[in-house]
Amino acid sequence: MAESKGSATIALNRKARHDYFVEDTYEAGIELFGTEVKSIRQGQVNLKDSWCDIDNGEMFIKGMHVSPYEKGNIFNKDPLRVRKLLMHRKEINKLFGLVKQQGYTLVPLSLYFRGSHVKVSVGLCRGKKLYDKRDDMAKRDAKRDMDRAMKERNR
């Protein structure tokens, strides 16, 4: 019998959606060691201050914190080490051109399981100004107030 290949979200980078306009998203695999995968399965990962960078035609994720596995002893790796992202060469070259010429930033948006593999959703982002952030917060507050009013009205 074949198992269904669902996806379970491990971690979200909520700050990325607050600080950036997400223009496009890409899926990438990530190169991990055994104790890191075990730690990620326990949910001990943080994407808050992470970003992606392209060096020599390869994409890397920097600043992602994976807590050491408690039973991993000498096999644990540095929690903030640079990890390689696995994407097709054509996609990496396209992103490299956009980042260098048009001033976009590559930001990891979420970490999730696709079957038994850990995947990263990488966003092609453009930075927000302070007034954009205020405008988004005002819209979010107005929507929340409207939802509350509708819920009270339906009671």
Image (cartoon, rainbow, N blue to C red):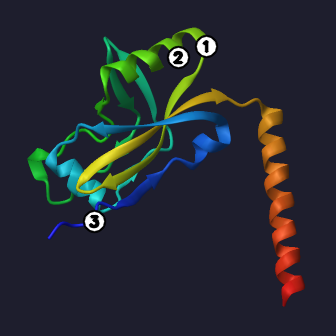
Mark 3 and mark 2: span between their CA atoms? 36 Å
User: Residue placed at 85% from the left, 86% from the top?
Assistant: 154
Q: Is residue 5 left or right of residue 95?
A: left
Q: Secondary structure at mark 1?
A: helix
User: Residue placed at 35% from the left, 24% from the top?
Assistant: 59
Location of residue 31 in the rendering, given as x and y in whole percent from the top left corner: 23, 37
Q: Which residue is mark 3?
A: 4
Location of residue 57 in the rendering, given as x and y in whole percent from the top left corner: 32, 14
User: Residue placed at 57% from the left, 9% from the top?
Assistant: 101
Amino acid type, label 3: Ser
**Marks 3 and 2: CB-CB under 8 Å?**
no
Q: Which residue is mark 2?
A: 99
**Marks 1 and 2: CB-CB under 8 Å?**
yes
Amino acid type, label 2: Val
Mark 3 and mark 1: span between their CA atoms? 40 Å
Q: Secondary structure at mark 2?
A: helix
Q: Secondary structure at mark 3?
A: loop
Q: Residue 153: name its quadrant.
A: bottom right
Amino acid type, label 1: Gln
**Marks 3 and 1: CB-CB under 8 Å?**
no
Q: Residue 44: name its quadrant.
A: bottom left
Location of residue 39 in the rendering, given as x and y in whole percent from the top left corner: 26, 56
From the image, state whether disc 3 or disc 1 is nearer to you. 3
State which tag comes first along the sequence, 3 or 1. Answer: 3
Mark 1 and mark 2: span between their CA atoms? 6 Å
Location of residue 135 in the rendering, given as x and y in whole percent from the top left corner: 84, 42
Q: Which residue is mark 1?
A: 102
Count neighbours of disc 3 (C-alpha within 10 A) and say few if under 14, some if 14 to 19, many if 20 or more.
Answer: few
The N terminus lies in which quarter of the figure? bottom left
